[in-house]
């Protein structure tokens, strides 16, 4: 029997940080049981996913910084820069830009002192210059209005920093501060949709809210940042858009899409 191939619908997956939906509640009660996870399933998924992540994660400079930096503001700044750069750009391209950026401006205070021209020059080649401008603007705001302290929760990050939407706020808060909050980007949408066979249009507010609820219910309470990165890593390297590598997937046993495809191939 050949390996089942799980393909995703041709609908365009949004990049990170598109318009966030307005969520009234993250209660899993709004999600039909078939598309949800039981307590035991969620526990097992966290364990399998994190074990895989510990074994297989890519060694990336922002991950190294986030895990070795003891100062929370420096940690949050290093994650914030990486998340903004990654919004529209491939990891392989970002690495070099990220390393140069952090060498030039290792702290948010350093970035706040830079001129916009210097920022644009450093951003040159990455595209979407408004991202660099917003980062610079945010650094100025943190230094001038927030006494140099980057907000400590996803809610405050989104509320207080220019250009920081729901995804980026959740990523910074979970990775830098250990806040137990999920994230949803294109990779997470694809993984969750396949795991629970969600075929509905995720661009609608109801489905988007349901995906955020699922992500918030699933996130590991002890390692939220690693869990979120693991979900995105799985989507980027294994549960890929065109041809998922299901035989390498740590979540195969829990995947409804995989089970369906396997059943079709057997009958
Ligand atoms: S979650 Fe895993 S098993 Fe399911 S489609 Fe993606 S790669 Fe395949």
Image (tube, helix red, strand yellow):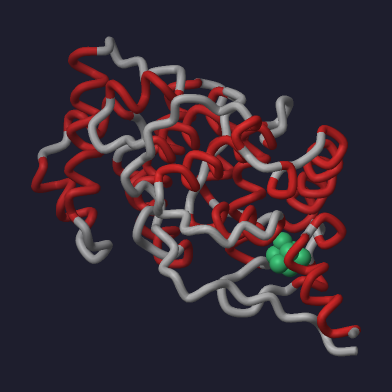
Can the viewer see residue 58?
A: no
Instruction: Name the residue rendered at 61%, 39% in the picture.
Output: 215
Which of the 4 image quarters holds residue 126?
Answer: bottom left
Residue furthest out toward the bottom: 1
Residue 205 visible here: yes
Farthest top residue in view: 147
Where residue 168 appears, as percent x and y from the top left, is 41, 38
Determine the image quadrant of residue 59.
bottom right
| Percent coordinates x, y for residue 19 in the rendering | 31, 44
- Please state the total of marks drawn on the protein image: 0
- The x and y percentages for residue 213 are 57, 35
Q: Horizontal and vertical percent for residue 222?
A: 73, 26
Residue 26 horizontal side relative to residue 37, left or right: left
Q: In percent of the image, x 11 and y 39: which residue is there? A: 115
Image quarter (top left, top right, bottom left or bottom right) of the C terminus: bottom right
Quadrant housing residue 261: bottom right
Residue sitting at x 55%, y 41%: 210
Q: Residue at x 24, y 18 (%)?
A: 143
Viewer-closest of 113 and 236? 236
**The quarter of the picture showing ligand 1:** bottom right
The quadrant of the rendering that contains the N terminus is bottom right
> From the viewer's perspective, is residue 61 above or below residue 96?
above
| Image height of 2 relative to 169, above or below | below
């Amino acid at each position: 029997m050949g390996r089942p191939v799980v393909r995703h619908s041709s609908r365009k997956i949004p990049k990170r940080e598109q318009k966030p939906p307005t969520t009234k509640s993250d209660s899993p009660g709004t999600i039909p049981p078939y598309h949800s996870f039981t307590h035991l399933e969620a526990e097992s998924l966290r364990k399998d996913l994190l074990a895989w992540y510990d074994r297989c994660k890519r060694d990336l400079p922002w991950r190294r910084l986030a895990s070795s930096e003891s100062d929370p503001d420096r940690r949050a700044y290093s994650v914030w820069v990486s998340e903004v750069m990654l919004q529209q750009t491939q990891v392989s391209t970002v690495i070099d830009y990220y390393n140069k950026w952090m060498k030039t401006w290792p702290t948010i205070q350093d970035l706040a002192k830079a001129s916009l021209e210097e920022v644009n020059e450093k951003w040159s080649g990455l595209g979407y210059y408004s991202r660099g401008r917003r980062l610079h603007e945010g650094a100025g705001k943190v230094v001038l209005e927030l006494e140099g302290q980057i907000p400590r929760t996803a809610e405050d990050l989104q509320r207080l920093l220019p250009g920081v939407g729901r995804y980026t706020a959740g990523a910074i808060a979970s990775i830098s501060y250990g806040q137990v909050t999920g994230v949803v980007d294109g990779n997470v949408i694809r993984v969750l949709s396949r795991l629970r066979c969600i075929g509905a249009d995720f661009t609608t507010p109801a489905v988007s809210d349901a995906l955020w609820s699922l992500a918030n219910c699933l996130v590991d309470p002890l390692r939220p940042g690693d869990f979120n990165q693991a979900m995105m890593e799985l989507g980027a390297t294994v549960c890929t858009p065109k041809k998922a590598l299901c035989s390498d997937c740590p979540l195969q046993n829990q995947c409804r899409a995989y089970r369906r495809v396997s059943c079709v191939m057997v009958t």
